[in-house]
Image (cartoon, rainbow, N blue to C red):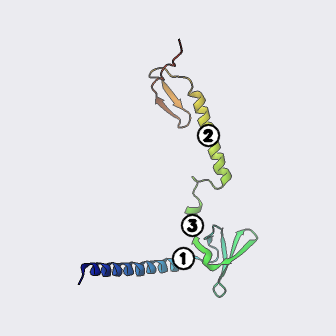
Amino acid sequence: MDPTLILFAVVAVVLIFLMFRNSRRNKARQEELKTQMVPGAEIMTNFGLFGKLLSVDELSNVAEIETSPGVIVKVHRQTLSKVVTPEEAGDSDSPRSVEEAMAIANREAEEREAAAKIDTEAPEYGERVDDPITKATTKRAPRAPKKTDN
C-alpha cells in the first residue's frame, strides 16, 4: 500500500471522529439550554433582544418575551440563544448605554486636557509632579531648554 493513501485514510478517520464528538457536545449544550429556558427566566435572543421569557409553545415553535412591562414580543423558539445570569447582567465596569460610554469618554478627554495644561510648565530637576489622571506622584526629568534664534 502507498503511504500517502494510508495517511489520507487516517486523516479522514480523525476528521469523522472530531465531527461526531463536536455534534455530541452541541446536542448536550442545546439540552442544557433547553432545561434553563423556563418561563420567568431572563433571556437573550440571537439578534440581541433581552427580556423575560413568558411562554414557549413547542407545537408552533413560538416564544413570548416581555421586553418591558406590558410589551410582549413573539419570536421563533430557535432565536432564543442564552439565559442571562445576574453576573453577566450586573457588570458594573462596563457602560450600560452608548450615551454613558460617550459621557465617560468625554470626562476622560477633559481630564487629559487639564493634565496637558498643567504639563506646560517645566519642572525643576528632580521635582515631584502630581499626575491628575492617575492621582500619583511621579518624578520627571526636566525638559530641554527652548532654543532661540540669536
* Residue 94 coordinates in the image, percent (x, y): 58, 54
Rendered position, 142 above or below 63: above
Amino acid at pointer 1: Leu
Query: Given the current orientation, which residue lies at the most extreme right position?
Result: 70
Circle 1 residue: 33
Query: Given the current orientation, which residue lies at the most extreme top position?
Result: 150
Q: Secondary structure at mark 2?
A: helix
The answer for how far apart the CA atoms under marks 2 and 3 are is 34 Å
Rendered position, 131 above or below 27: above
Q: Residues within 10 Å of mark 1 (few under 14, many from 20)?
A: some
Q: Of discs 1 and 2, which sits in the foreground?
A: 2
Circle 2 residue: 109
The answer for how far apart the CA atoms under marks 1 and 3 are is 13 Å
Which one is earlier in the sequence, the residue at label 1 or at label 2? 1
Say which residue appears at 48% left-offset and 78% top-offset.
Answer: 26
Say whether marks 2 and 3 touch (CB < 8 Å).
Answer: no
Q: Residues within 10 Å of mark 2 (few under 14, many from 20)?
A: few
Say which residue appears at 64% left-offset and 77% top-offset.
Answer: 39
Q: Secondary structure at mark 1?
A: helix
Rendered position, 101 above or below 6: above
Tell me which corner region of the image, top left, top right, bottom left or bottom right, holds residue 13. Answer: bottom left
The answer for how far apart the CA atoms under marks 1 and 2 are is 43 Å
* Residue 142 coordinates in the image, percent (x, y): 47, 23
Q: Of discs 2 and 3, which sits in the foreground?
A: 2
Circle 3 residue: 85
Amino acid at pointer 3: Thr
Point out the image quarter for the N terminus. bottom left
Tell me which corner region of the image, top left, top right, bottom left or bottom right, holds residue 59. Answer: bottom right
